[in-house]
Image (cartoon, rainbow, N blue to C red):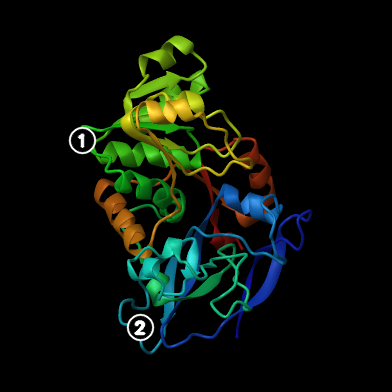
Amino acid sequence: MQPAKGYAATDSQAPLAPFTFARRDLGAHDVQIEILFCGVCHSDVHQVRNEWGGSTFPMVPGHEIVGRITAVGAQVNTFSVGELAGVGCMVDTCRSCPNCKQGLEQYCETHISFTYNSTEQDRVTRTYGGYSNQIVVDQHYVLRVSDKLDLAGVAPLLCAGITTYSPLRQWQAGPGSRVGVVGLGGLGHMAVKLAAAMGAEVTVLSTSPGKEADARALGAHRFVVTKDAAALKEVRTYFDLIINTVAANMDLNPYMNLLRLDGTMVMVGLPPEAPQIGIFPLVGQRRRLAGSHIGGIRETQEMLDFCAEHGLTSDVEVIPISQINEAYDRLVNGDVKYRFVIDMATL
């Protein structure tokens, strides 16, 4: 076992604090990565505070990892020491179920080994995340990172980027399509950037008029204040696709009425309560309400390559690890544009 250090929560009420633990020794198919930056996802807060239930402690959060490879196993043939690399929300899956075989590991039917607060495929060995100095991951779940982009801005692409890229690709956003984005936070700002880069017409749907300038700066073509009944009426039956990034409870029915015939609203935020949906908005225009969950390894690499080609990164505020507890409170209050990223050199 290899000694490692990081920040961990020891229970759901405790602040994150320095923590020492062990990473597994480098296996034949493993890649060891020195972590340079790690993004802070709202799901980190949910899990550290056990707001979803099922949290296990001590917990080292972090699944938006960018770093440099420091060692590779004897049978690693896709990565070399010194290269930049990334690790996202999962570090292993069963690899044998139908979904894994299709490259859709995020929908593994057997067991996903999430990057933290999870277990390896043996269902026993705990996983610890990226709020740490290093990580050891099987090469299949390691991603290539371009040196053309700001690495701090790349880190959130491993979650916020792929979470929004995957439904945009699945529902074929591009030239001629009209995409609405509900919410302009960590996920929403990436949905805007990606959809615009794909060539879609992008509209931000927000309750906050003050976000219009930011939305347009990010690439949005239109901005609709959803509290304005007249403005909302103008985009009734307008969108082919709506990406809903909001993680709070909300009435989805007004948004369903904004979809065209065969339009789809895709949920990527995770509200704590099940939404209530009227059947008439669905059947009247053959609309769909769908969900989407991160992306497989192949699609995540495609997303990173797309971002490198188009010069896209997340808008970030880089913090030292000592400010992580303050960052959690600010994140809950929406006080960040648009993603915190930890400089792991401060560990």
Indicate the quadrant containing the N terminus: top left, top right, bottom left or bottom right. bottom right
Q: Position of residue 119 (x, y in %)?
A: 59, 72
- Residue furthest to the right in view is 13
Which residue is found at the position 63% from the left and 78% from the top? 124
Dot 2 amino acid type: Val
Q: Is tag 2's residue or tag 1's residue first in the polypeptide sequence?
A: 2
Residue marked by disc 1: 175
Residue at (29%, 53%) from the top-left corner? 308
Residue 164 in percent (x, y) is at 40, 45
| Residue 158 seen in this snapshot | yes
Near-viewer residue (230 or 313): 230
Pointer 1 local density, CA inside 10 Å: few below 14, some 14–19, many at least 20? few
Quarter assignment of residue 289:
top left
In the rendered view, does 82 fall on the left or right side of 210?
left
Which of discs 2 and 1 lies nearer the camera? The answer is 1
- Residue indicated by mark 2: 76
Above/below status of 88 relative to 324: below
Instruction: Determine whether the residue tagged by mark 1 lies in a helix, strand or loop.
Output: loop
Seen from this angle, which residue lies furthest top?
A: 230
Q: Residues within 10 Å of mark 2 (few under 14, many from 20)?
A: some
Q: Residue furthest left?
A: 175
* Residue type, label 1: Pro
Label 2 secondary element: loop
- Establish if 80 lies above or below 108: below
* Residue 334 found in image quarter: top right
Measuring from the top left, give residue 101's x and y in whole percent: 34, 71
